[in-house]
Image: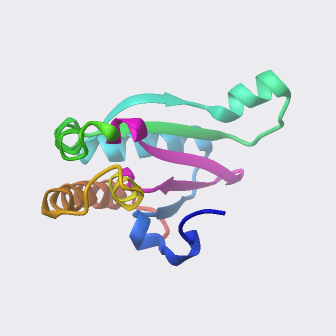
Amino acid sequence: MLPIDPTQFDAEDIGEKRATLHMDHEAAVDHVREAFLDAGFGVATEFSPSELLNEKVDAGRDPYHVLGACNPNMADRALDASERRIGGLFPCNVVVWQEEPGVQTVYHVSIMKLARLTGMAPDDETMAGIIGDTGELVEAAWANLDAAE
């Protein structure tokens, strides 16, 4: 039994965002990468779990790609605010998966908000500022997507 009820949280509590892109998968991954780069994020890492799983266990998964986005200033501030614990959640992942050919879902949750909810980061003004600042960057990236919400 979990010590909290996860259903008590809504999308805003965890910084959940979804968007739909009407393009093929590779174009969507490129588009999302550019949208986040233009908003001030770097892409520290990326990989395709679907390719790995299809190769290793013949999973038959549709295209699924993870972009590990990071804004160095926000990461540095969050490490200090969380006594370095938030690094366990780095990088901030943005996921692109294929719903059907030509339709991709883009998904993100705020690791800053999750860290605060789990106690990895404090619930104080410093962390609230970091959450606000990273939220603005994510909103800018989301605006760059020009996607159907």
Q: Nearer the viewer, residue 104 or 138?
A: 138
Q: Nearer the viewer, residue 145 or 23?
A: 145
- Residue under the image location 68 percent in, 40 percent down: 63
Q: Position of residue 79 (x, y in %)?
A: 23, 39
- Residue under the image location 43 percent in, 28 percent down: 45
The magenta region covers 86-111
Q: Nearer the viewer, residue 3 or 112?
A: 3
Q: Position of residue 41 (x, y in %)?
A: 28, 40
> Is 105 covered by the magenta stretch?
yes
Q: In the image, 91: left or right of 83?
A: right
Image quarter in which the N terminus is found: bottom right
For residue 6, say whether it is visible: yes
Q: Nearer the viewer, residue 35 or 87?
A: 87
Q: How many marks?
A: 0
Q: Position of residue 142 (x, y in %)?
A: 36, 59
> Is 78 covered by the magenta stretch?
no
Q: In the image, 106: left or right of 33?
A: right
For residue 91, say whether it is visible: no
Q: In the image, 6: left or right of 37?
A: right
25 vs 53: above or below: below
